[in-house]
Image (cartoon, rainbow, N blue to C red):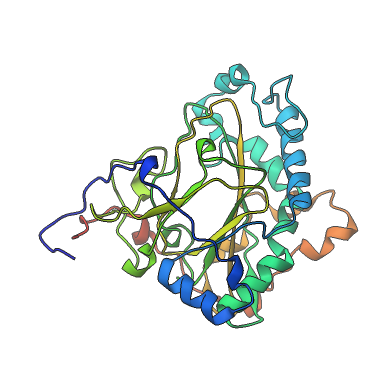
Amino acid sequence: MNASMDSVPVKFQVADLEPFEESTELLGDPEELRARAERDGYLFFRGLLDPEPILQLRSKVLEILTEHGLRASDADPLDGKLDLARLNELSADQMRVDIGVTADVYTDLQKLPELHRLPHHPSLLDIYRNLFDTDDVFVHPRHIMRAMTSHPATGATPPHQDFPLVQGSTATWTCWFPVGDCRLESGPLVILRGSHREGCLPVGTGDGEGHWTNWGAQLCEHETNWVGGDFAVGDVVMFPSLTVHRSLPAAVRDEVRISMDVRYQRGGDVIEARSLTNHSDRPWDEIYQGWSSENADLMYYWHPDRLSYIPWDDALLEPGARRIC
């Protein structure tokens, strides 16, 4: 790195985006899978997940948006078309701007058993067993469901690392997948290839788009190796918590972009206690209310007494000195 250069605002150009490298052919070769993860800081798989349960979840999410008056009246059952007039009547204070809808809508989304079932998909667990080289894979219960809309208070998420936001172990991985097809113009997630090798970056860019400006990772002018592409339902990208990623700005303004962020770690690694809460920050009893017995295995499946904890560090999210590039 050139010690004479401070970090500078890096203008992102979608036209410069390189395609994801697919890793599906490595599923049977754990050693090569780990080597690619170490090299690139991400793994992308086409058609890893069965589309049917994902589309079932999408249907449930859209039903909730309809109940809250946010769907267009002429929308097809799996169509994400929104009632923009109704959406724009909502104040910024009502919105969970990191999610794309109101806090009340988000609580209803978090109550869906289907949302909590998908992260335990056998195909995902098998990959993490191979990546972590252990059968002891812990699935964080704090699943994130985003239903990103074009409300004026929302925007594209700027470049950031998950570690300052999740903490615990730097070996924690995030798995991102859309709940339905997601084209580039819908604003999917993209990855800064190889960025995990730079360690935990200082935050506070001051130039980002959207609501995470103060949490954005400081990047250098040469760090432009962004990779991404269209997602079909069932496609998955995953990456460790030090990999820099962002969402693209959505060119499609009248459709909701539905996606999930799910996190995994080795059972023996340290964890921060907030990772055992739900992402709507409601009591678990409220989230589980009304669930049938067939979903009992998803309720309180974690065992806090077997986990090793590390305290939350506020300093990781405090903008500090400019990064030296």
In the rendered view, tell whether residue 97 sits above or below residue 175: above
Which residue reaches farthest top? Answer: 85
- For the residue pair 27 and 148, the one nearer the viewer reads as 27
Residue visible at 59% across and 47% down in the picture: 231
Is residue 169 shown to the viewer in this render?
no
Which residue reaches farthest front? Answer: 25
Which quadrant would residue 156 be assigned to in this image? top left
Image location of residue 21, percent across then percent down: 49, 60
Image location of residue 107, percent across then percent down: 67, 42
Image location of residue 297, percent across then percent down: 81, 65
Is residue 11 shown to the viewer in this render?
yes
- For the residue pair 33 and 314, the one nearer the viewer reads as 33
Left or right: residue 265 versus residue 52 is: left
Which quadrant would residue 208 be assigned to in this image? top left
Residue visible at 44% across and 66% down in the picture: 41
Tally the numbered discs: 0
- For the residue pair 2 and 233, the one nearer the viewer reads as 233
Left or right: residue 40 versus residue 321 is: right
Left or right: residue 220 versus residue 144 is: left
